[in-house]
Amino acid sequence: MSTYLRSTRHPWAGFLFLLPLLVAYEGGLVWLGGDQAARLRNGADAWLRWAFEVFGAGHALAAPAVVLGVMLAWSWWRWADRPDDPVTVWFGMAFESAIFALVLWQFSRNFGPIIDGLGIKLQVTVRTAPAAQVLTFIGAGIYEEVLFRLGLFGGLVLLLGAVRIPWPVSVPLAAFAAAAAFAAAHHIGPYGEPMRADYFVFRTIAGLYFTVLFVARGFGIAVGAHAGYDVLVGVVVG
């Protein structure tokens, strides 16, 4: 068990877990959307593509290629201690992702009563979406974790460490900053939702939840849990 717990946090396990999700997302968008595939992309994906276009890398495969390239480079750096049984690790990560997605989904269904019990009058409604948008939910799980956990949280931890802020301070500070940015991002841009305190509070908590998974269980499980939660919210009524 201890070997498995370490293996899920290895970048090679994360790469193998991420690869089929990324292929399904990118391939599915082309299959369903054709030349209008951009209309189905989630916000984090669109932002990354916009950033690549600014630097002259506007090809449709630029974003997934960069993500996979980073994971491969990270795996090469850690190649000596890669998992011995990646197939078993992959299925274990899929199971864990489903469990952690269900935990957050159940919390989201009871978030309103929990907050009301604390004396804060907020209301959360679960927004449903057609099952055809499952690909969009998978993309959100991938690219939002790339942007906010792997990129922003990880980058802030490194930056704060470089200026000699001790990790007991830097890690929580980076986690809260990345979670707040994750929540705020859903209200930015032409497709952003109107700002609501309940949505912002819940998404900040969700961002912290995914950060804990990222640190404790690895990038792949954070992606899987995020995608699984979004799919549950999108296709399960009530």
Image: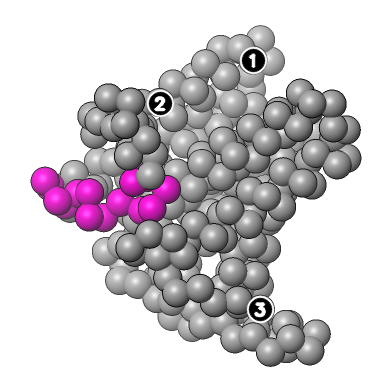
Disc 3 residue type (three-letter): Phe
**Camera-side residue: 47 or 26?**
47
- Quarter that holds the N terminus: top right
Q: Residues within 10 Å of mark 2 (few under 14, many from 20)?
A: few
Query: What is the span of residues highlighted in magenta in the rendered image?
Result: 33-46
Q: Position of residue 238 (x, y in %)?
A: 49, 83
Left or right relative to 68: residue 216: right
**Camera-side residue: 13 or 173?**
173
Count of marks placed on residues = 3
Residue, disc 2:
66
User: Which residue is located at x 61 percent, y 12 percent?
Assistant: 77
**Camera-side residue: 147 or 103?**
147
Residue, disc 3:
111
Q: Earlier in the sequence, mark 3 or mark 1?
A: 1
Distance, label 3 to label 2, CA atoms, is: 36 Å
Secondary element at tag 3: helix
Q: Position of residue 7 (x, y in %)?
A: 68, 29
Left or right relative to 195: residue 175: right
Q: Earlier in the sequence, mark 3 or mark 2?
A: 2
Check the image and report above or below for 19 versus 140: above
Q: Is residue 26 in the magenta section?
A: no
User: Which residue is located at x 65 percent, y 70 percent?
Assistant: 201
Distance, label 3 to label 1, CA atoms, is: 40 Å
* Residue 170 figure quarter: top right
Residue 78 circle label: 1
* Residue 156 figure quarter: top right
Left or right relative to 189: residue 101: right
